[in-house]
Image: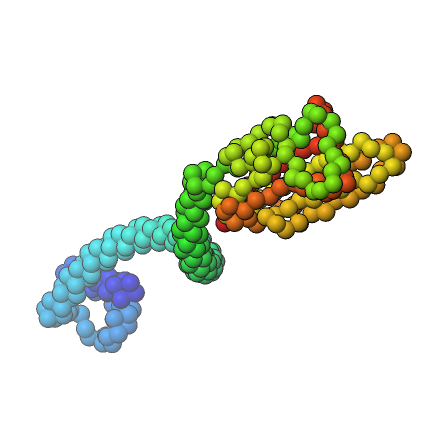
């Protein structure tokens, strides 16, 4: 800027000096002005100088053209500077907007980073919970395997028990068939007589129970007074007898074949009605006999009230 202004001042001075020379002379004042102008231009003027050589004028013209050119360039530079300033302002505005956006982005990035940290923490928690769940799952799998083994064992035992139960049921059915089919139906119950007192006698007699309640299998004979075992087995027998004589002894015996197995005695005082009763289970072979014997010197009584009875039945065959 300063150099352009200096060229412009120099050009004006030279133009003014040329105009004075062409007008026909130089006065004293003019000389003084010329000297001042020469001092400004840095050229020392002498007292006899009145004209400027054509080479100097050519140089001045060249300098003028250069000044004009610099002036034009200066104006173009100002225009460029203004454009650059406008562009700079626009860039600053865009930069400010970018900085605002950048601040927003930074804030969002910070928020995202915080959210990322939270997500990482939650992920670690989920990993821990998942690992715990996996451990629990493994434990449950092991327990399930153990339970399956136990269930399998129980199922095997259940099958064994079922097999044994089926075998037992078959045995029970077989026993039922044997009981209901093979085992004879043997049971009897008899009353003695309606004639009242029997005895006493000078010898022992076999009592013949003649009043029939039941006689399944016809194993007891009221004619002989003998019970004959139709099969080998366990048998139950019971009896009850009454004697109406007062102040006397009563006695009754139960025999298995020729062996006396029960002896019942009792003494009645003034009122009589001396009662004897007993029962037992005997193992009998097929054809064995059981019967009641009234000893000599003793009596027994029965009437329509069934005071004296003899009973027996097969429990099970052997």
Q: Is residue 238 visible?
A: no
The quarter of the rendered structure image containing the N terminus is bottom left
- Residue 253: give x, y in percent of width and height: 70, 44
User: What is the count of numbered marks?
Assistant: 0
Quadrant in the picture for residue 76: bottom left
Would you say 99 lies left or right of 196 here? Answer: left
Would you say 246 lies left or right of 252 here? Answer: right
| Residue farthest along the right direction in this orientation | 270
Q: Residue at x 78, y 44 (%)?
A: 265
- Residue 53: give x, y in percent of width and height: 12, 71
Q: Residue at x 19, y 56 (%)?
A: 72
In this orientation, which residue lies closer to the viewer: 213 or 155? Answer: 213
In this orientation, which residue lies closer to the viewer: 295 or 156? Answer: 295
Q: Residue at x 45, y 44 (%)?
A: 175
Q: Is residue 306 above or below residue 131?
A: above
Would you say 296 lies left or right of 136 here? Answer: right
Q: Is residue 304 above or below residue 119?
A: above
Q: Residue at x 67, y 33 (%)?
A: 309
In this orientation, which residue lies closer to the viewer: 77 or 280? Answer: 280
């Amino acid at each position: 800027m300063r150099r352009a202004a200096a060229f412009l001042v120099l050009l004006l001075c030279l133009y003014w000096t040329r105009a004075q020379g062409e007008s026909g002379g130089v006065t004293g004042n003019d000389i003084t002005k010329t000297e001042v102008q020469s001092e400004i231009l840095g050229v020392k003027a002498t007292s006899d100088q009145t004209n400027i050589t054509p080479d100097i004028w050519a140089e001045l013209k060249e300098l003028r053209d250069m000044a004009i050119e610099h002036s034009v360039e200066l104006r173009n530079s100002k225009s460029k500077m203004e454009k650059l300033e406008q562009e700079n302002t626009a860039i600053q505005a865009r930069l400010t907007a970018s900085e605002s956006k950048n601040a927003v982005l930074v804030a969002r990035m910070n928020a995202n980073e915080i959210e990322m940290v939270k997500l990482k923490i939650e992920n670690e928690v989920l990993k821990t919970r998942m690992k715990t769940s996996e451990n629990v799952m493994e434990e449950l799998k092991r327990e399930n395997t153990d339970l399956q083994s136990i269930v399998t064992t129980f199922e095997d035992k259940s099958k064994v028990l079922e097999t044994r139960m089926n075998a037992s049921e078959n045995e029970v059915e077989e026993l039922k068939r044997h009981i209901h089919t093979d085992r004879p139906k043997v049971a009897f119950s008899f009353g003695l007589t309606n004639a009242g007192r029997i005895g006493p006698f000078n010898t022992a007699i076999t009592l013949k129970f003649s009043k029939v309640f039941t006689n399944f299998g016809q194993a007891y004979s009221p004619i002989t007074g003998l019970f004959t075992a139709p099969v080998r087995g366990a048998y139950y027998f019971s009896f009850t007898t009454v004697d109406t004589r007062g102040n006397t002894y009563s006695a009754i015996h139960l025999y298995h074949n020729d062996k006396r197995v029960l002896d019942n005695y009792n003494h009645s005082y003034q009122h009589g009605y001396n009662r004897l009763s007993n029962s037992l289970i005997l193992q009998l072979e097929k054809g064995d006999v059981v019967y009641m014997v009234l000893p000599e010197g003793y009596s027994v009584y029965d009437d329509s009230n069934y005071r004296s009875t003899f009973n027996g039945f097969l429990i099970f065959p052997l």
